[in-house]
């Protein structure tokens, strides 16, 4: 069993037996177990909304949000390499990223590597590409570590070889996001 997330109400997201479960506690000792409709439920917010990933089919995986009162909503389709662990805040915003593999690997070296792509999905604005809002040098990648309830994102711009980094705070200022 692997535990992924807990909210203020004591609801816990776990992965066991090849599926995701929502565990709800009552008075500290009794609990109920509910199967999640998401293949890999990963984070839960204080409203009980859960973000996760669908099962990979034909090289595609979806980032999905499940709200017990309204069902599953697919917010992004990702193809290619590993999709990162999504985060959800109490405003319903979702951060997710998608890594990419080297296009060519020869003698153990990677050539034509593309940077991971970082996104914030907002209920009103849809998908917002974050990488364009952070100036990085060649060979640097944006790595987001956290998303708060105001939509602020915190992370670092990391040199691919791991030798240096600098902290980054992205604030949700819609006027700067563009159209």
Image (cartoon, grey):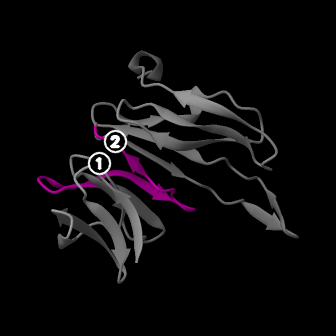
Crowding around mark 1 (Cα neighbors within 10 Å: few <14, some 14 to 19, many 20+) is many
Q: Is residue 120 above or below residue 77?
A: above
Secondary structure found at label 2: loop
Q: Residue at x 39, y 32 (%)?
A: 151
Q: Residue furthest front?
A: 28
Estimate the x, y position of residue 10 in percent, counting from the top left. 25, 57
**Cα distance, mark 2 to mark 1?**
6 Å
Estimate the x, y position of residue 134 in percent, counting from the top left. 61, 28
Q: Residue furthest top?
A: 175
User: Left or right: 141 with respect to 174?
Assistant: right
Estimate the x, y position of residue 81 in percent, counting from the top left. 57, 62
Q: Residue furthest right?
A: 107
Q: Is residue 141 above or below residue 48?
A: above
Query: Is residue 65 one of those drawn in magenta?
Result: yes
Q: Could you tell me which quadrant the N terminus lies in? A: bottom left
State the image quarter where residue 163 is shown.
top right
- Dot 2 or dot 1: first in sequence order is 1
Residue in front for this viewpoint, 33 or 37: 33
Q: What span is colored magenta in the figure?
A: 64-90
Residue identified by numbered label 1: 45
State the image quarter where residue 56 is shown.
bottom left
Q: Could you tell me which quadrant the C terminus lies in? A: top left
Secondary structure found at label 1: loop
Residue 148: give its label: none
Residue identified by numbered label 2: 89
Q: Residue at x 15, y 57 (%)?
A: 68
Mark 2–mark 1 CB contact (< 8 Å): yes
Q: Residue at x 34, y 69 (%)?
A: 14
Residue in front for this viewpoint, 61 or 23: 23
Query: Is residue 117 one of those drawn in magenta?
Result: no
């Amino acid at each position: 069993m692997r535990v992924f997330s807990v909210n203020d109400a004591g609801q816990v997201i776990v992965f066991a037996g090849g599926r995701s479960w929502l565990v709800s506690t009552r008075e500290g000792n009794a609990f109920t177990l509910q199967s999640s409709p998401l293949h890999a439920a990963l984070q839960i917010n204080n409203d009980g909304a859960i973000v996760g990933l669908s099962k990979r089919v034909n090289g595609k995986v979806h980032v999905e949000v499940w709200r017990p009162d309204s069902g599953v909503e697919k917010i992004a389709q990702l193809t290619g390499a590993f999709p990162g662990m999504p985060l959800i805040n109490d405003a319903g915003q979702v951060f997710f990223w998608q890594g990419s593999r080297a296009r060519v690997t020869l003698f153990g070296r990677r050539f034509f590597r593309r940077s991971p792509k970082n996104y914030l999905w907002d209920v009103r604005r849809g998908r917002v590409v974050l990488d364009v809002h952070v100036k990085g040098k060649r060979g640097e990648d944006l790595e987001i570590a956290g998303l708060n309830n105001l939509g602020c994102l915190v992370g670092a711009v990391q040199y691919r070889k791991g030798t240096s980094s600098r902290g980054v705070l992205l604030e949700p200022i819609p006027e700067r996001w563009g159209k």
